[in-house]
Image (cartoon, rainbow, N blue to C red):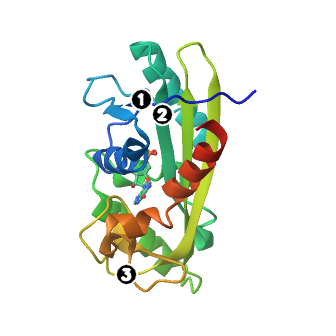
């Protein structure tokens, strides 16, 4: 049975600053105190699953067990239609170590050029998982559809935002104000599903 998530301390099981900011924007107005895994110096578990939900659960389980508090994780990525859904769950890995998202965006662009792709449609996917310390788990998935542009444009957001133009807009996610991105993002879509079910 679905469980109510009571406002209070919520561990954001991520070290990604862009995600932490967006999760705080979404959850703090509802009375949650969002504390990130990075702020608590928690280790980053290895993401060994092949689905967004699987990897989201790995991260939330690890943070809930380490802190004894409910944990929220975000596993997300961009799926490019002409590339058969790549980079998908491997989006972060395409940025290499240390992460360089310009390099990752350029790699996607090069792959599209290599196959002369006319279809530049892509979607962002976000899986939000909530895990309680007693092991109860809930997962919600959201999507945002759009097209890829080149070269990258805009200074806001993070990751692939500068090359993603959401459907119905001409600006990239990185050119939109945070409130505008929250009105149409994959993360906000998953958040609204979570809110309807758990809050
Ligand atoms: P992971 O969930 O830690 O495996 O990483 C997902 C990667 O997908 C991020 O590092 C970003 O590059 C990308 N990504 C996920 N959500 C967004 C977003 O809202 N904007 C831009 N890039 C995103």
Residue 183, numbered label: none
The residue located at (40%, 37%) in the rendering is 31
Left or right, 135 with respect to 14, comes to right
Return the x and y of residue 58 as percentages of the image width and height. Answer: 53, 28
**Numbered tag placed on residue 10 in the rendering:** 1
Q: Determine contact: label 1, label 3, CB under 8 Å.
A: no
Image-quadrant location for residue 11:
top left
The label nearer to you, 2 versus 3, is 2
Distance Cα–Cα, label 2 vs label 3: 33 Å
Q: Nearer the viewer, residue 137 or 5?
A: 5
Q: CA distance from mark 1 to mark 3?
A: 37 Å
Label 3 element class: loop
Report crowding for label 1: few under 14, some 14 to 19, many 20 or more residues within 10 A (C-alpha): many
Q: What residue is pinned by disc 3?
A: 150
Query: Is residue 51 visible to us here?
Result: no
Q: Is 59 on the left or on the right of 129, as rendered?
A: left
Compared with 15, 125 (above or below) is below
Q: How many marks?
A: 3
Between 145 and 5, the one lying in front of the other is 5
- Asked whether, in this view, residue 164 is left or right of residue 42, the answer is right
Q: Earlier in the sequence, mark 1 or mark 3?
A: 1
- Label 1's element? strand
* Residue ID for mark 2: 72
């Amino acid at each position: 049975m679905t469980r109510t998530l009571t406002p209070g301390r919520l561990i954001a099981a991520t070290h990604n600053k862009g995600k932490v900011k967006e999760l705080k924007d979404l959850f703090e107005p509802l009375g949650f105190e969002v504390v990130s895994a990075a702020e608590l110096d928690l280790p980053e578990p290895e993401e060994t699953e092949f689905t967004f939900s699987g990897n989201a659960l790995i991260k939330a389980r690890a943070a809930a067990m380490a802190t004894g508090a409910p944990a929220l994780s975000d596993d997300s990525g961009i799926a490019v239609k002409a590339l058969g859904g790549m980079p998908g769950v491997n989006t972060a890995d395409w940025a290499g170590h240390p992460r360089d998202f310009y390099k990752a965006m350029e790699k996607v662009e090069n792959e599209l050029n290599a196959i002369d792709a006319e279809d530049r449609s892509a979607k962002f996917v976000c899986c939000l998982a909530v895990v309680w310390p007693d092991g109860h788990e809930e997962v919600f998935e959201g999507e945002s559809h759009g097209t890829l542009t080149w070269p990258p444009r805009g200074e806001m957001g993070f990751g692939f935002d500068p090359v993603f133009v959401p459907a119905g807009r001409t600006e990239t996610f990185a050119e939109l104000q945070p409130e505008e991105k929250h009105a149409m993002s994959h993360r906000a879509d998953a958040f609204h599903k979570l809110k309807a079910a758990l809050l």
